[in-house]
Image (cartoon, rainbow, N blue to C red):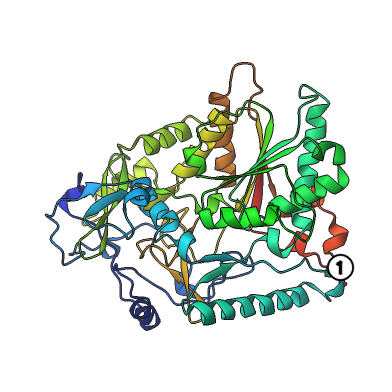
Amino acid sequence: MGSKIRGDTFRWMTTAHSTCRALLSNMQLGGNARYINTQGGSKRNPNDKATDEDSRQPKGYLESVRDIMRMPATTADPRIPARRVTASECARIFTKQPRNVTMLVREFISDSLYNPAYGYFSKQALIFSPKRGFDFSKFRDSADFLKTIGVQYQEMESELDDVRNIPRQLWHTPTEILKPWYGYSIAQHIVRQFKADSAGKQKGQPLVIYEMGGGNGTLMINILDYIRDNEPGIYSSMEYNLIEISTKLAKQQLRQQARKSQIPHTNVNIINKSIFDWSKRVDMPCFFVAMEVIDNFAHDIVRYGFETGEPYQAFVRVYDDGEFEELYEPVSDPLITDYLRARAELSGPSYNTPALPSALYRKLRSMVPFSPNLTRAEFVPTQAFEFCRVLGKYFPRHRLVLSDFYELPDTVPNAVDAPVVQTRFGGAMVPCETYLVQPGWFDIFFPTNFELLKQVYDHVCQSGSAPGSSPAHSRVCTQREFAKENADLGMTRTRSGENPMLDFYENTKFLIS
C-alpha cells in the first residue's frame, strides 16, 4: 500500500449529525464520512451563504493532534492485498465500485463522478432548463426573477422525485437561466476576436469552435443562432465541434442540434469522448469554449512533511466491506510530479502554497510534543493541468474562453482549495465534510484559483507551442467585466434597473486567451 507516515494510517473520524445518519440509512451508503446539516444551496446558486458558524473554514488553520486520530478505519482485514486502479480502468471493467483496491485521489473522484455505470453524472445530475428564455422587462427586480426561477425549479424537482422516487440533483447554469443572452455574449466575444484575427495572419480561415462539456446543448444553439442571424458570411463556412464525455448528454445535444421547431444547424459535430482521451492534432486556428466544466475536474491531495517540506501524495484504500481510508506515500505519480515542478517554474509572482508554513515555523512546530508530522491537505488541480497540456499539444493555435467558480460556500473544511461535496435529501442540499463518500450520489466540485491557473496555462501552452506560433497570453476577468464588454445588457435589465447578467454569478471568473 505504499509508505505510511510514522507507521500509522491517519483517518478522519467524527460523530455524524442525526439527520445525516438518517441520510446514510435511507440512501444505503457505505463509507465512514463526516456530514454537516446546514442550509447549503445549489451548486449553481452564487447567492447561497453558509449560515452555520461551525461550517465556516477557519483562516490559517493548522491541524492539532486531536484532529488526526490513529484508530482503526474499518473492520475489514487490511492485510488483504489491494491493487492500484484508475478511473478509466474502472469504467471499462466494473459495474459497481470495486473493493480491495487503491486509487489516487483524482482517480477516486473521477470514478465517483464519471463512471458510466455508477458515477454521479450518469445517475443523478440533471440540468435545470426553462422551456424558453425570460422577458426580463416583465420582472420588477432581481428578487422577482429569482422567485419565478425558484417556482419552476421546485416544480421540476418535485416531478423528478415523484416519477423516479430517488433524490436526483438538479442544478442550473447562467447559460440556461439567462438564455439566450448569456450565450449571445459568448458568441459576440468570439466573433469580435475572430474578425480581429482575420484581419491579420489568419485572413481567409473559417471560424472553428470546440466546446467541451456542453450540457443540454443550449450554449451551442445560442452561439450558432447568434452567428447565423448576425454574421451570415461567417456562419456559412464555420464549424462547431462539441466534445462530451457523457453519452446521455451527447444524445441530448444531438436532439438539440436537430430540433424540428426551427431550422437545424448542419455544421455541428458531436464527439462523445473525454477531452483527456483526445489524440487528434488540430492545426487550424480555433476557439475552445469551456463553461463551468473544470469545477468537476478531479484534484489530487498533497500534504507536506513539517520537518522537510517534502510532498506526499494521498491515495484511497477501498476495503472489502466498502469502507474508505486515506493513506499517504511520497510523491511518485508523474502527473502530480509534473504539476508541482511546473508550478515551481512559473515566471512572474511565485506561488507559495498556504498549506506549507515557513521553514522556521515548521522547525519550531516540530519541537512541540505530539505535533502532527504532516501539514493540512492541499487539493492540487492535476486534471486542470492536464487539460492545459492537451490544449497546448493538440490545439496549438486555439483561443480559450473558459469560465467557472473562483469561490464557493460550504467547502470541505481545513484544506487548501477544497471542494464542495453535496447531495440532496428531503428537498434540501446537504453539504459534506469529506470527499470519501459513496460514488454516484454526491456532486464533487472545486473552486478555481484563476490567477494561478492563468500562470500555469501560459507556462504550459508556451512550452508546448509549435515553432513559429505565437506565445500564449491570457487574461482573467470577472463575470461582470465580461458582460459589460460583450452582453446586450438592455435585454436582461429588470424594471428596477437591476440586471441579473451583471449581478448574478459574482463568484465566477473568465480565463480568456
- In the rendered image, residue 265, in percent from the top left (x then y), is placed at 74, 48
Q: Amino acid at mark 1?
A: Gly
Q: Is residue 288 visible?
A: yes
- In the rendered image, residue 118, in percent from the top left (x then y), is placed at 39, 61
- In the rendered image, residue 428, in percent from the top left (x then y), is placed at 52, 78
* Depth order, front residue of 167/502: 167
Q: Secondary structure at mark 1?
A: loop
Q: Is residue 406 visible?
A: no
Residue at (63% x, 54% y) in the render: 253
Residue on which disc 1 sits: 497
Total number of numbered labels?
A: 1
Give the vertical position of 143 relative to 190 (above or below). Answer: below
Quadrant where the C terminus lies? top right
* Depth order, front residue of 441/299: 441
Give the vertical position of 177 relative to 303 (above or below). Answer: below
Q: Farthest residue in the front direction?
A: 260
Q: In the drawing, does residue 480 fall left or right of residue 386? A: right
How packed mark 1 is, by other alpha carbons closer than 10 Å (few <14, some 14-19, many 20 or more), is few
Residue at (64% x, 16% y) in the render: 468
Q: Farthest residue in the top direction?
A: 468
Residue at (33% x, 40% y) in the render: 309
